[in-house]
Image (cartoon, rainbow, N blue to C red):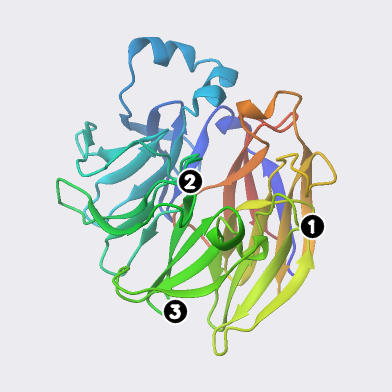
Amino acid sequence: MPNWEISEIESLKGFSVEWDNPEYLIIAKRNILYEVNRNNLKIKKKIGNFPLPFWKKILIRSVLIQRFFRGFFYNVIVLQNKDIFVTFGKSIGLIKSNGKFKKLSGIKKPFRVLRNSIAEDKDGNIYFGEYSSNKNRKTVSIYKYSPGKESIEIRHTFNNNQIRHIHGIYYDKYSHSLWCLTGDVKDECKIIQTFDGFETMKVIGSGDETWRAVSILFAKDAVYYAMDAEFQKNKIFMINRSNFKRTELTEIDGPVYYSIKKGDDLFFQVTAELCPSQTDKNASLWKISNNVAKKIWTKQVDSYPQILMPGTINFSNGAGEDDESFFHCIGLLDCTSKTFKMKRI
């Protein structure tokens, strides 16, 4: 089984790696993005910033207040035309080549897009969905943005009382399809596949928390996901592509938000959410190699209330390299605001 080494990058303390390209990295500090040389990790230039009122720029200098306001970049995606599509808090727009931010029209209401939960298809179009508390179970929409356009279009709307929110939309390069993950309870938990941009959809599974997931990973012969269950014991599953049979690979120690695939290895981060299904107070990192699971890293949640965000391990976006990846932590003891490199050895 391949081994991976995890080490802190001291020079990037206070920054987060948001976009990982074989030639360069894009890192963030509060509301500002920078380009970094991938080899020596030195900042080359400021790319741009998300515009904030002066009072908020001052307040989010405190990490705790930044966590309270969710004052982070959640998604940073370099598009085929080199515009940078970003979501920051509940705002969505572009950072252009001149560093200016451009807000896009077409959004019905403010919402957050969960981290790295945006799909880019083979034509460069991107899809994302509404994530909000939505306690009253109002309508929830899926959006599409095509590079070069001034607005975002709605591709599908779930009716009242169908789902609470959308956890993520992901592109499957093996089947050229999109997968949509929804939550949170009973029949609201769905894993959906579409081959035509949500004109038609197939529900792969639904009905309980075993189908509640935030992220999903794709291999040639199978699809993998981990549960984001509040009450049931969390597990990692494999779905066979040929017959859609679901196989349990392992039980894990809590709900999973984010996951990443590097080469043939799959990584799932358990969030320290302190929900009923979680028996300890740790976030952890699990690796799947050849369908064998192993916990490789763990950190305890910090002492601050969950309203200031649960303890998470946040992977960078972008193709990067198969033998290394970057992540940063929020809400974990002695790890918050630190960036780590994960490297195959």
Which residue is at 33% across, 15% downward?
Answer: 53
Could you tell me which residue is drawn at 42 percent across and 80 percent down?
Answer: 175
Nearest the eye: 345 or 29: 29
Q: Position of residue 134 (x, y in %)?
A: 47, 41
**What residue is shown with label 3?**
174
Local packing at callout 3 (Cα closer than 10 Å; few below 14, some 14-19, many 20+) is few
Q: Distance between the residues labelled 1 and 2?
A: 24 Å
How many neighbours does mark 1 have within 10 angstroms: few (below 14), some (14-19), or many (20 or more)?
Answer: some
Report the residue marked by disc 1: 295
Disc 2: which residue: 114
Q: Which amino acid does label 1 sit on?
A: Lys
Q: Label 2 amino acid?
A: Leu
Q: Compared to 160, does 266 lie above or below?
A: below
Could you tell whether 21 is left or right of 314 in the image?
left
Residue 181 against residue 70 in the figure, above or below = below
Q: Report the front residue among 54 and 321.
A: 54
Q: Earlier in the sequence, mark 1 or mark 3?
A: 3
